[in-house]
Amino acid sequence: MSNGDPGELVLRGRGIVPGVVEAEALVTRDPISGFGGIDVATGTIIEPRHELYGVCFTGKALVFPGAKGSSGWSGFFQSTRLLGTAPAAFVFDVITTKAVLGAIVTRIPTVVEATPAPLDVIRTGDLLRVDGDLGIVTVRKPLSP
Amino acid sequence: MRLTDEEKRMRDGAEGGAVAAAMDLLIRYGEALGADRLVDTRNVAGTMTQPSPAKAQLVREGGWAKAYAVINLDSDEELDIPRMRVPTCQLQHGFSDDAAGLTAYTTQSIELQGDAESYFSERGVNILATCTPYQVGNLPVRGEHCAWMESSAVVYANSVLGARTNCEGGASTGAAALTGKIPYWGLHDPANRFATHVVRADTRVDSFQDWGMFGYFVGEVVQENRPAVIGDLGQPDLTDLKHFGAATATSGGVELYHLPGVTPEAPTLEAAFGRGAVPEPIVYGEAERRWVYETLNAQGSSTDVDFILLGCPHASLDQVAQLAYLLEGRRLADGVQLWVMTPRALRAMADRNGYTRTITRAGGHVLTDSCPAMSRAAPPGTKVFATDSAKQAHYLPAILGIEAWFGTLEECVDAALTGRWRGGLA
């Protein structure tokens, strides 16, 4: 990749699910709940108090702090894989059994504990390359209109 | 991750393909967590029988073996599923035949689940069918390594019982059941069990409702951390701590709390922190209490209530008895449904004591196995429901698109008898 591109920012962390994918970022500072938090049939956030309420994550690189709520978390995201509504990648910071197992069974490239902090530098709409093999997230800002 | 010879043999297929797939999942999972080994467990609480559209499709393609392989082992291999290696129970799942006809929940789903029960009970899974296994005979002892899911059961097992489990999921419990292993990480390690925060109640916490509201606040402020809670607290009982823990794991992700003088790993506040310093407390005062109440009641605008849901987490025998006492000789208002969810083993006791008959005569239903949130089904036409559970008030509006009121058992029963919500914060 074009390491020298000044428009690119490289975050280094730990890859926990292998694979490489490019996708648009969907960023939230709110932790995500599986059970009661997402609708697996449509791939949308349904928790009323969530800042992404009503937003679809299908095909997006979901950048979030971590998982909260029920232990159904992994099963709910696994269902998005089986129903074709899964995100394209996960980037998160807080390591919990829910989020880690969820990433594994969703089978999407996942990078955790990256530096600089993903929530500080990634914005919704940025183009991400999430490399779960090497634990690297490359951020490209969208071109200004 | 370091593996024992036994674990390597399992990984390499000496005990069959399903055990090998289970070990492969545990290794991927343990390495992703950053664990350096697995630990033995003989107490697994997971879920295999709950129907879902994705699972129904897998069963059509390859029976329950395929559903277990994909969902509980994350494997696309064709596997024979052997008997579970260690004691394993099924947590809450979908509605069973006692709820047939009460909702739009389909007979096909009820039958599919019955089929799953046959398949998995033949393989040694105890169908406890409750979110509260600790109420019906699965009571781990202090220090016991478990692999449990169901956030409200996990926080109860860790905090009240002093057992050691992380909040596992369908795949990790599926793999643990076939291997008797789970990553030694997180709350399995005593070094990770000390408190991180103090939350102090400056307003009295002494009723079932108080404990639920306090828990909702604690979860909100500590998220996935480990709080020690102190202050103006009455002596809690099983139902209070069942409600409190479930609420902390709803607004946040609490898997272990300490209640100095009550829970086993915190004889004192200082002991809850080990050798660490005790931080400044986060205060739960009257304003915070009101915030919780208003948050849980922000999802209701119509006071015409048509559904009352009690028993989240599944009601204790005492809760069923209290409900029966309040409904004795009364009759629900026209058009109002009242359900209380309880483990099937406790319903047998409620039947024996006459509680079921009293509740049924009043027009209510004592149901088992599930809840409206798990089964995504309420009585047809429900627009506004009321509950005494902070957890159910939080989740059900999002899941079913209905309005919610949160109050005391007495307020819920009043709504059931009048069809009107008249609750308020005392």
Image: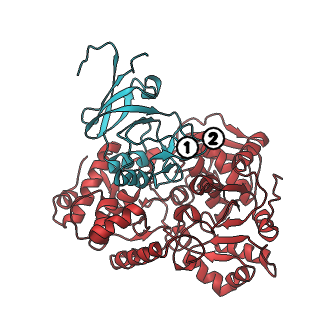
Chain colours: A cyan, B red
Residue at mark 2: chain: B
Please give the name of the residue rendered at 65% of the width and 71% of the height, measured from the top-left corner.
B340
Q: Residues within 10 Å of mark 1 (few under 14, many from 20)?
A: many
Q: Disc 1, disc 2: CB below 8 Å? A: yes
Q: Residues within 10 Å of mark 2 (few under 14, many from 20)?
A: many
Residue B318 at x, y percent in the picture:
69, 73
Residue B190 at x, y percent in the picture:
45, 49
Report the disc number at residue A74.
none
Q: Is residue B319 visible in the rendered structure shown here?
A: no
- B322 vs B231: above or below: below
Q: Residue pushed farthest front?
A: A145
In-image side of B237 versus A35 (left or right): right
Residue B52 at x, y percent in the picture:
43, 64
Residue occupied by mark 1? B195
The amino acid type, in three-letter code, at marker 1 is: Ala
Residue occupied by mark 2? B198
Q: Is residue B363 visible in the rendered structure shown here?
A: yes
In-image side of B422 versus B323 (left or right): right
Please give the name of the residue rendered at 38% of the width and 31% of the height, measured from the top-left corner.
A24
Residue at mark 1: chain: B
- A111 vs A39: above or below: above
